[in-house]
């Protein structure tokens, strides 16, 4: 049986996630337009900075911000993590003209996590012209 396109690109996003340098969670993103992969990205330290997987230390785990109800929500506590998100890395690797009307496929290697873009990534996705986001849990 032939795999459908959404699962095909989600599988690729999972392979991209395997390149993540994060010790906590590995995310991968693939931007597709007109059935062509425009860019990929995974989460990790900015170029030229030490990767958590190489140092064996998670800055966020070692320097947690105070936990309160707001901070515990997804997309908060940016100051405690040095990683650039998978969606951000994919977006900065592509030309905006190629992303207009595109789909972003987002995957996490931790199957218990339903990946959703944080507020900052959601804004970047919209400004890039990407109109559809697909995860294993669905499309939004």
Image (cartoon, grey):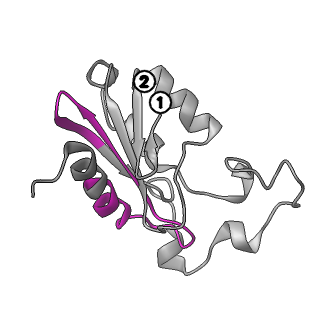
Q: Quadrant of the N terminus?
A: bottom left
User: Is residue 126 shown left or right of residue 61?
Assistant: left
Residue 96 higher or lower than 63, as above or below: above
User: Is residue 62 on the magenta stretch?
Assistant: no
Name the spot of residue 9 as percent of width and height, x first: 25, 48
User: Is residue 31 on the magenta stretch?
Assistant: yes
Name the spot of residue 75 as percent of width and height, x first: 67, 47
130 or 93: which is nearer to us? 130
Residue 109 higher or lower than 57, as above or below: above
3 or 37: which is nearer to us? 3
Label 1, residues with CA under 10 Å away: few <14, some 14-19, many ≥20: many
- What is the tally of numbered marks visible in this picture? 2
Q: Are marks 1 and 2 in contact (CB under 8 Å)?
A: yes
How far, Cα to Cα, is label 1 from label 2?
5 Å
Determine the residue positioned at 69% across, 66% down: 60
69 or 44: which is nearer to us? 69
Determine the residue positioned at 26% across, 23% down: 98
The numbered dot on residue 128 is 2
Q: Which portion, as a residue range, is magenta? A: 12-39
Secondary structure type for disc 2: helix
Determine the residue positioned at 31% across, 58% down: 16
Residue topped by disc 1: 125
């Amino acid at each position: 049986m032939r795999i459908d396109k959404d699962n095909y690109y989600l599988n690729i996003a999972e392979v991209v996630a395997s390149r993540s340098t994060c010790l906590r969670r590995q995310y991968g993103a693939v931007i597709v337009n007109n059935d062509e992969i425009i860019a990929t990205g995974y989460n990790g330290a900015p170029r030229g900075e030490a990767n958590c997987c190489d140092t064996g230390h998670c800055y966020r785990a070692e320097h947690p911000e105070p936990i309160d109800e707001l901070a515990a929500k997804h997309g908060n506590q940016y100051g405690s993590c040095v990683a650039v998100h998978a969606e951000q890395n994919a977006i900065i690797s592509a030309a905006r003209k190629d992303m207009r009307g595109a789909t972003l496929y987002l995957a996490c290697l931790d199957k218990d996590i339903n990946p959703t873009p944080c507020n900052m990534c959601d804004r970047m996705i919209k400004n890039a012209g990407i109109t559809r986001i697909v995860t294993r849990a669905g499309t939004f």
